[in-house]
Image (cartoon, rainbow, N blue to C red):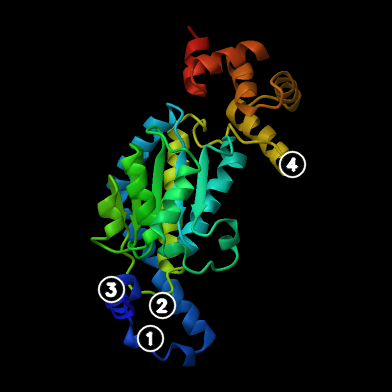
Amino acid sequence: MTSHDLRTQLASLTTEAFRPELAGIDRLPTLDIARLMNGEDAGVPTAVAAQLPRIAAAIDAIAERMEKGGRLIYAGAGTAGRLGVLDASECPPTFNTDPGQVVGLIAGGPTAMVTSVEGAEDSGELARQDLDGLEIAPADTVVGISASGRTPYAIGAVEHARALGALTVGLSCNAHSALAAAAEHGIEVVVGPELITGSTRLKAGTAQKLVLNMLSTITMIRLGKTYGNLMVDVRASNDKLRARSRRIVALATGASDEEIEKALTESGGEVKNAILCLLADVEGPTATRLLEESGGHLRAALAQAAR
């Protein structure tokens, strides 16, 4: 693609549109600029709401595959890639997932998290190589993320994953995007032109973060990683999380501090097991067995214990 062709393509994208009414923004008082920016951000949730049926359909498909041992893999370049890596990195401490269960791929590798890697986003072949390194299988899901919806790395990842039989999702912030068209589930959150022309780390980035929050969080709810709105699979790796673990058990059971400490000790610190011990009045090994038989779903384990 020539430089002229690329400029023409970018000029056609909503996320790249120039807003002449904001051409003097640098001359405004700081508070006025902040009000303008806040007003712009306020419209992002509405744009996400318009895509909720598509988001929900993607989540159900992702959860179905993850129940069978599949992985959730994000692939993007620049801000989009960083957001995917961020979401993936937060799943182990929040939901006690294996580090390889939710994976974030960014064009250019780990270095691209903090510095720009020239040309990486323009390579669909690089995306294919990155996915091949993960040995993609049909139970896996690959989510391509690109504000423009035209980034070759994201499109290449989705196309390659689909050819390998994996589930594919394309998350873009422009309508009729090539990325959404390449995926089985296209999600296009159209937030409009940015306050700073083409700076898609702003509204587009916020929209992508909101959608990724939904994809991972609701999938984990479907997989039984929560009990109501409690993080019962939280990994207690520091003092704050250990205190949170005790609070979660208390909220779920209403047990005394002494009972909670005893249950957590019997269950090796596993919050979900401790709750089952207290609510079903069973010993630690029995709680472990019931959870294994119920696929880790606490409500199902409680129902089984009550039979």
The answer for how far apart the CA atoms under marks 3 and 2 are is 20 Å
108 or 30: nearer the viewer: 108
| Depth check, front residue: 273 or 112 | 112
Mark 4 or mark 1: whose residue is earlier in sequence = 1
Q: Residue at x 45, y 40 (%)?
A: 72
Give the mark nearest the N terminus, 2 or 4: 2
- Residue lying farthest to the top in this orientation: 307
Residue type at tag 4: Asn
Of callouts 3 and 2, the N-terminal one: 3
Q: Is residue 155 visible?
A: yes
Which-is-in-front pick, marks 3 and 2? 3
Report which residue position mark 3 lands on.
9
Q: Position of residue 278 (x, y in %)?
A: 63, 18
Q: Label 4, on which residue?
A: 238
Q: Residues within 10 Å of mark 2 (few under 14, many from 20)?
A: many
Q: Earlier in the sequence, mark 2 or mark 1?
A: 1
> Looking at numbered disc 2 in the image, what kind of residue is underneath it?
Leu
Residue type highlighted by circle 3: Gln
Identify the mark at residue 22; answer none if there is no mark: 1
Could you tell me the amino acid type at mark 1? Leu
Q: Position of residue 86 (x, y in %)?
A: 55, 53
- Is residue 212 visible in the rendered structure shown here? no
Tell whether label 4 touches label 2 (CB within 8 Å): no
Query: Can you say whether 19 is above or below 282 in the image?
Result: below
- Quadrant occupied by the N terminus: bottom left
Where 208 sits versus 100, above or below? below
How many C-alpha atoms fall within 10 Å of the one at disc 4: few (<14), some, or many (≥20)? Answer: few
Q: Which mark is residue 133?
A: none
